[in-house]
Structure formats: C-alpha cells, structure tokens
Amino acid sequence: MFSRIFRAPEGDNGAAPTADAPVVAAPTVTHGSAPVGPTKIAARDVSVFYGGKQALYDVSLDIPDKTVTALIGPSGCGKSTFLRTMNRMNDTISHAKVTGRIEMDGEDINARSVDPVLLRARVGMVFQKPNPFPKTIYENVAYGPRIHGLASSKSELDGVVEISLKRAGLWDEVADRLHSPGTGLSGGQQQRLVIARAIAVEPEVILMDEPCSALDPIATAKIEELIDELRERYCIVIVTHSMAQAARVSQRTAFFHLGRLVETGDTEEIFTNPRERRTLDYITGRFG
Ligand SMILES: Nc1ncnc2c1ncn2[C@@H]1O[C@H](COP(=O)(O)OP(=O)(O)OP(=O)(O)O)[C@@H](O)[C@H]1O
C-alpha cells in the first residue's frame, strides 16, 4: 500500500510548494507494484480527428499483458477516443479518422487483412452503462461463442456459459435463473453479465470505459475485485474518472491532458512521484 501526501503547488509557474500551501492526499495505491507482463498492445504516434477537430495528438504507449492499465485525465482529454482505437471502434464513427500505428502482438490491427469483427472478439469492450442484450442471461453469454463457432454442442456451450459467468463472479447469483432476462438483474450484476459476455468469446484484451460510473459503491467494489482477478488472464485497459479507482485497480497509469499523453508509468510511481507538474496537479485535485 502506497500513498503520499502532497503539498499543492502555489501557482502554475512551477514554483516549489511552500509550507503554507494546502495539503492534499493522493489516493492510496493498492496493487501498483505488482509485476507487469510483456507488451500486448503498442500504440505509436496515434492521432485521431473528428472531422476537422483533432482529439488525440501523436500518442505512443505500450500496454502490457496480464496487467491493468488505467487511462486518467480530465473530461474531454481523449481517454475514450484512445481506448476505442484499440479495437477499431472509431471505425464505426463516420467522421473519425485515425492515423499512426497500433500493434497487437506485433500485428498492425488496422491492416486490411484484419477483420474488425474478429478483432473486437479478441479485444472486448465494456461500456459505462451496462448494455445486456434484451435476451436471457444464458443467451447473453452464449450468443458470441455461438456466432464465432466456439462451441460444437449444446453441452459445450453450457460449459462456456458456466465458466464465463464464474470468471465474471456472477455464477452463484444467477445459476438458478439462467433463462430469466439479463435486463432483470441489478446494475452491478448486469455489468458482470456484460463482462461474462466479453469473456465468453475468449478475448485477450478487455477495454473498460468507466465501467463503474453507473454503479453504487458496493457494486463498484465487486467490479474492482473482479478486475483484479481478471488481470491474471487478460490485458485490461480501464478509463476512469476516479483517481482512487485507478490507484486501487491498476498497475500502470497513463495521464492524458488536452489530447496528449502527458505521462505514463507504474501506478505507484505516478501517484507517489509523478515526473510532470500537470500530473501532480491532476492527481491532487487541482483541476479536473
Ligand atoms: N463522436 C465524436 N464526434 C466528434 N467529437 C468527438 C466525438 N467523440 C469525442 N469527441 C471529442 O473528442 C474529444 C475527446 O473526447 P473523449 O470522449 O475521447 O474524451 P474523454 O477524455 O474520454 O472524456 P470524458 O472523460 O468526458 O468521457 C472531446 O473534445 C470530444 O468532444
């Protein structure tokens, strides 16, 4: 467990903090010193334009496997835009243009030979608002494996549904009502159902865009515990507005501001000893 009490800077001129400046606590880092895996995704000079407006500027970032990487920064800084470049979700926005290169396991994900539908199975995504299909719990999870041909029999499909729900920490709560509507679950359960749905197609990467922002603190704590368990198996990237959450769940943190990647590093380092003034100001709540 790491935490650091910062003295908030006096001004924006880079002057050293003074003894009179208010003291602000940076969030406590929980798993920030856990080892990170080899690079899974490598982004190089990635820029994104929406029509004539540039939203991201030359972002280069390595995302390690078997690790939770948190993308933090003030509203509108480009976190979600960057997240979407990793499974080509920006392709679905007609006026969006992505330049630069993104490799997954050394392969250019924007190459013509890459089918975006298959890519999105390998790189699953969980959104802010839980979005189960208007189908049963079972069907929500079985749908993907069925269309991707990942189960050859009903019993195999049953097994995939069970293991996915177990990995998403939901099995015990739904085992006796698999054929009830997914939309009948609580918000936190729905979010775990969506995670089970992503897991069912055997992804390598799970992208999460503020997955807890619509949840209460108890449901949030469950999702955070789940994220911590999932990192043993997957590369996870999470966009969060909550610095406390970034500090609790991630091992790597990337701080964005005004469309640029300002700083990235071990979460422990970013929250206890950031190199950049803007990072310090953000994590101590001076702006955001
Ligand atoms: N579909 C879109 N069309 C046009 N502009 C967009 C679109 N999506 C995002 N933008 C703009 O791109 C910039 C970055 O937005 P983005 O949603 O990536 O930021 P963010 O850091 O995730 O913000 P927030 O924390 O508020 O979700 C913003 O100026 C936003 O208005």
Image: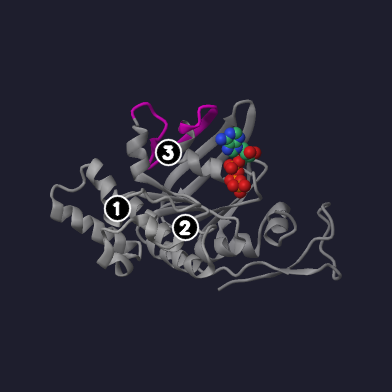
Crowding at dot 1, Cα within 10 Å, few <14 / some 14-19 / many 20+, comes out as many
Queried whether the magenta region covers residue 99, the answer comes back as yes
Badge 3 vs badge 2, beta-carbon distance below 8 Å: no
Quarter of the image with the C terminus is bottom right
Find numbered disc 2 in the image and state the secondary structure of the residue it sits on.
Answer: strand
Q: Position of residue 84 (x, y in %)?
A: 49, 41
What is the three-letter code of the residue carrying label 2?
A: Val
Q: Position of residue 180 (x, y in %)?
A: 30, 59
Q: Which residues are magenta?
A: 92-113
Closest to the camera, between mark 1 and mark 2, is 1
Image: 268 above or below 261: below
Q: Which disc is residue 9 wearing?
A: none
What is the three-letter code of the residue carrying label 1?
A: Val
Tell me the residue that label 3 is attached to.
103
Quadrant in the picture for residue 186 = bottom left
Q: Residue at x 44, y 62 (%)?
A: 188
Closest to the camera, between mark 1 and mark 3, is 1
Q: Residue at x 53, y 45 (%)?
A: 61
Q: Position of residue 64 (x, y in %)?
A: 44, 52
The Cα atoms of the two marked residues, 1 and 2, are separated by 23 Å
Tell me the residue that label 1 is attached to.
141
The Cα atoms of the two marked residues, 3 and 2, are separated by 18 Å
Find numbered disc 1 in the image and state the secondary structure of the residue it sits on.
Answer: helix
